[in-house]
Image (spheres, rainbow, N blue to C red):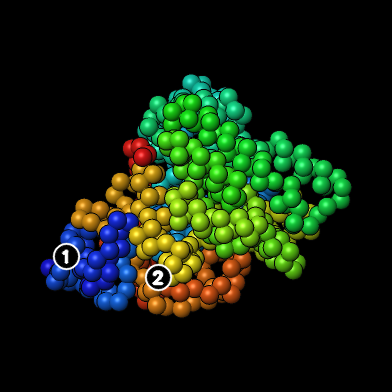
Amino acid sequence: MYELVIKKGRVINSDAAFTADVAVEDGKIAAVGAELAGRREIQAAGKLVIPGGVDTHLHFTLDLGGGLVSTDDFFTGSRAAALGGTTTVVPFIHPEEGESAAEAFNRRQREAVGQSVVDYGWHMNIGPEAFRRSGGVRSFVEETAALGISTYKLYMAYGYRLNDAQLLQAMEAIAGVGGLPVVHAENWELLSHLVQRAVDAGHRHPRWHEKTRPAEFEAEAAARVIAIARWVGLPVEIFHVGTREVVAQIRRARREGAAVYGETCPQYLFLNNGAFEREGIEAAYAVCAPPLRSEEDRRGMWQALAEDDLQIVSTDHCPFTKEQKRAGLQAGFHKIPGGVPSLEMRMAALYSEGVAKGRFSENRWVELCSTFPARLHGFAQKGVIAPGYDADLVVFDPAARRTITAEGLHEACGWTPYEGLELTGAVESTIVRGTPVVEQGRFTGERGIGGYRSRSGAL
Ligand code: DUC
Ligand code: ZN
């Protein structure tokens, strides 16, 4: 008799689909087979049983400075994740000047321990300050790897941005520990110039957010960082791809045999730059970076997922309050805090628009949202339903119908850019390492069930 058995669901892995019982013991999947009995049983006939979602790109309490902090903290954010079928998240550590990797890690851990409902790892941000430390970037990366962190965020934009020589040195250091760089690719010099020019000309409307961040310059940055990674001989993942120009760079590199990976996010799959023309504050809600692009780009992201030109769907979840967005809107497009909430809708939205509408298979859905992000980011125990893996499981009702509303979501911002979006399929139960935290679509978990998962390397 097992501790918990999910009965008679259709188990979906990235490479197989079959009807079976899934038995759980001590937080692990103990058996997958027929006629398994549990002290507790969840009936899943007619439902899909998938490995819990893995979201390898999101922000909890991101501090943009000047009092602007993104709203979801570890509890509200991880609860939204669980309700949306995501059981592993990877937010960021932004070390402060003079802070060691361990000090920064401990500071962030204090926000997460006892709060997170789902498991989590960390990306370590390598900013210019890493180069000013004694021992330089290499010892900073080694110190980080010793904490069980194997993924490193490199910005080509904002205050954290690295110049090209720093990108190269950071990548050499990451290669030395078998890690993976994940990159925000935009050409900061060009876009800053265009933003200033637009502001000087008196432009304030959110549409100028996209106009001042041309896709060509985003693609130029992606091509540049891909070239550096290839020269160093290191895999690289380009974050939040929303334009076909960047997809073309990734595709070209991959066809030449380079280990280059691309992520897109729900905002680039469900929204286009028409959102900047919405009324009032709705236009400010849509501001995120890189910006939303054309309808052709939006369609192009779906095609890229189907054709494996993009390999991961994460969220870059980073909501700000209505008041923060409104204050930005009044000050002008360049002052609107960038970020949208997508964490809770990701899995169901990808099923609805991807699988139910025939764009790709159930297996590809699981691969994009769970198996491959787990594998690329070094979560060796996650993303697969098989004995020995973590019992992170989701029971998903493929026939349920749901309309997205801000009221029905649990993200801590009170708005959603997807208001009114109709979805086929809904998360019914979520299990985090053997513990049900969502049952019948309702949160039943407790703070602190999730834990830090250390990693020893990336793909
Ligand atoms: N883009 C956003 O829109 N928000 C947070 C960080 C980022 O790169
Ligand atoms: Zn980014």
Residue in view at x 72 percent, y 67 percent: 278
**Looking at the figure, which quarter contains the N terminus?**
bottom left
- From this viewpoint, is residue 317 visible? no
Q: Nearer the viewer, residue 250 or 440?
A: 250
Q: Nearer the viewer, residue 411 or 96?
A: 411
Q: Position of residue 2 (x, y in %)?
A: 16, 66
Left of 459 or right of it: where is 252?
right
Occupied quadrant, residue 324: bottom right
Disc 1 target residue: 33
Disc 2 target residue: 427
Circles 2 and 1: CB atoms closer than 8 Å: no
Say what amino acid the circle numbered 1 marks.
Answer: Gly
Q: Residues within 10 Å of mark 1 (few under 14, many from 20)?
A: few
Q: Can you tell which of label 2 and label 1 is closer to the viewer?
A: 1
**Element on which disc 1 rests:** strand
- Nearest to N terminus: mark 2 or mark 1: 1
Say what amino acid the circle numbered 2 marks.
Answer: Val
Q: Which mark is residue 268?
A: none
**Element on which disc 2 rests:** strand
Residue in view at x 40 percent, y 26 percent: 176
Left of 458 or right of it: where is 62?
right
- From this viewpoint, is residue 330 visible? yes
Residue in view at x 65 percent, y 52 percent: 291
Residue in view at x 75 percent, y 67 percent: 280
Q: Position of residue 50 (x, y in %)?
A: 32, 63
Q: Nearer the viewer, residue 425 or 71?
A: 425
Up/down of 155 relative to 326, above or below: above
